[in-house]
Image (cartoon, rainbow, N blue to C red):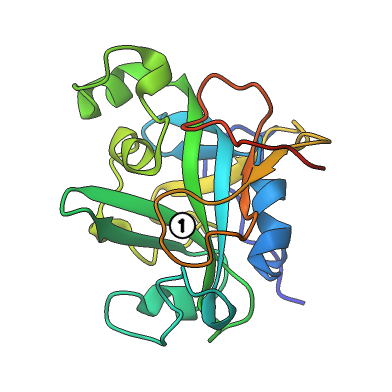
Amino acid sequence: MTAAPPAPPWIPANWSVLPRRFYMRHPTEVAPELLNKMLVRDDGRAARIVEVEAYAGGEDPAAHSYRGRTARNATMFGEAGHLYVYFTYGMHWGSNAVCGPVGEGMGVLLRAAEPLSALDLMRASRPAAKRDRDLASGPGKLSQAFGITRALDGADLVRADAGIAIVSDGTPPPAAPLVGPRIGISKAVEFPWRWCVPDHPHVSVRPRRSSS
């Protein structure tokens, strides 16, 4: 088995980068376990992930990868544990962690996070935010707060050599996350593939129902 790469010096010693095997599962398994993990950058920006959505390739009509590989979605079909970044609504970037086997086109959308450090950098990146709880309370807001653009598409979240990673600080996922349908899609709207930390003020939209 290949040894895990050493964590870069900008990640605190008591935090651990999520290993490749964490992502090498179906996105509906990965997504709820990403709740309460930390998205971090090498400039000090860090936020706790509080809302995610799963997208499952060819079995999911709402996925960008449903109809196969294109230049736009190629990263989704690559190795798990990489960042897939896409442009949407002509103005926003969406950030996803690639999941599952190579070639399946699966991933988890990072929908919202609670900013915890380097908020001055996030505020500078998100001048439209009127309060800190709005800095990363939506997929486009999260990407903007972290300075994520297409230039980071394909970044390896495990090796963290592009200055971005998802790590654990020891906080477990919620035992009973809120679960509900995904937002802003027109297909597979019945799939309950959005998970949120219960009662968290940084969630973008509270699900209408809950489940464990």
Decide if residue 8 is on the left or right side of residue 144.
right
Left or right side of 87 for 109:
right
Crowd around label 1: few <14 · some 14–19 · many ≥20 (10 Å) = many
Tell me where residue 201 sits by quadrant.
top right
The residue shown at (75%, 38%) is: 173
Residue 99, given in percent of the width and then of the height, sits at 59, 68
- In terms of depth relative to the viewer, which is nearer, 156 or 59? 59
Q: Quadrant of residue 104?
A: bottom right
Location of the N terminus (image quadrant) = bottom right
Residue 96: give x, y in percent of width and height.
46, 57
Relative to the observer, which residue lies in front, 19 or 34? 34
Q: Regarding mark 1 in the picture, which secondary structure is present there?
A: strand
Residue 118 seen in render? no
Three-letter residue code for mark 1: Asn
The residue sitting at 62% across, 60% down in the picture is 191
Percent from the top left, x then y, of residue 148? 30, 47
Q: Which residue is mark 1?
A: 96
